[in-house]
Amino acid sequence: MIINHPILGPRDAQEFVYLGDAALIDRPDGMTDGIEAFHTYAYLRDNPAGDHRELWYHEQGDRSWLVVTRNTVTHEITKVELARDVARAMGRST
């Protein structure tokens, strides 16, 4: 599988480490959101068939975090974004 890195161009997926659902970017505030919100964040994940946003870490490259939109059935990658840009668009500081 080839991941088209937004800065470095096409890279083999073996250079990356898959880290799970991209919803992990939106971590609840442990001081204000309560234990239920943190439990949901830590333990509950969607497992869709179809397009899914995932976190990937470029371990054998520039050590960047990416949000990859990938079809879990066909493995087709439709979008690759820097995770910092996704977090900023959500209003989170990096």
Image (cartoon, rainbow, N blue to C red):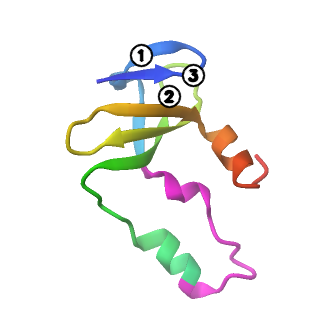
Q: Measure how far apart labels 1 and 2 are at the Cα level.
A: 9 Å
Examine the structure image and report whether residue 21 is included in the region drawn in magenta. yes
Residue 84 in the image, given as x and y percentages of width and height: 68, 40
Q: Residues within 10 Å of mark 2 (few under 14, many from 20)?
A: some
Q: Earlier in the sequence, mark 3 or mark 1?
A: 3
At horizontal 52% and vertical 19% (from top left) the residue drawn is 61
Asked where in the image residue 65 lies, by quadrant, the reply is top right
Q: Residues within 10 Å of mark 1 (few under 14, many from 20)?
A: some
At horizontal 42% and vertical 16% (from top left) the residue drawn is 11
Mark 3 vs 1: CB contact within 8 A: no
Q: Which of marks 1 and 2 is nearer the N terminus?
A: 1
Asked where in the image residue 49 lies, by quadrant, the reply is bottom left
Residue 58 in the image, given as x and y percentages of width and height: 50, 28
Disc 1 marks which residue? Answer: 11
- Look at the image and give the residue range highlighted in magenta: 20-36
Q: Earlier in the sequence, mark 2 or mark 3?
A: 3
**Residue 58: assigned label:** 2
Helix, strand or loop status at disc 3:
loop
Residue 1 in the image, given as x and y percentages of width and height: 28, 24
Amino acid type shown at disc 3: Pro
Q: Residues within 10 Å of mark 3 (few under 14, many from 20)?
A: few
Amino acid type shown at disc 1: Arg
Helix, strand or loop status at disc 1:
strand
Amino acid type shown at disc 2: His
Helix, strand or loop status at disc 2:
loop
Disc 3 marks which residue? Answer: 6
- Of discs 3 and 1, which sits in the foreground? 3
- Vertical order, 46 against 74 (above or below): below
Examine the structure image and report whether residue 29 is included in the region drawn in magenta. yes
Mark 1 vs 2: CB contact within 8 A: yes
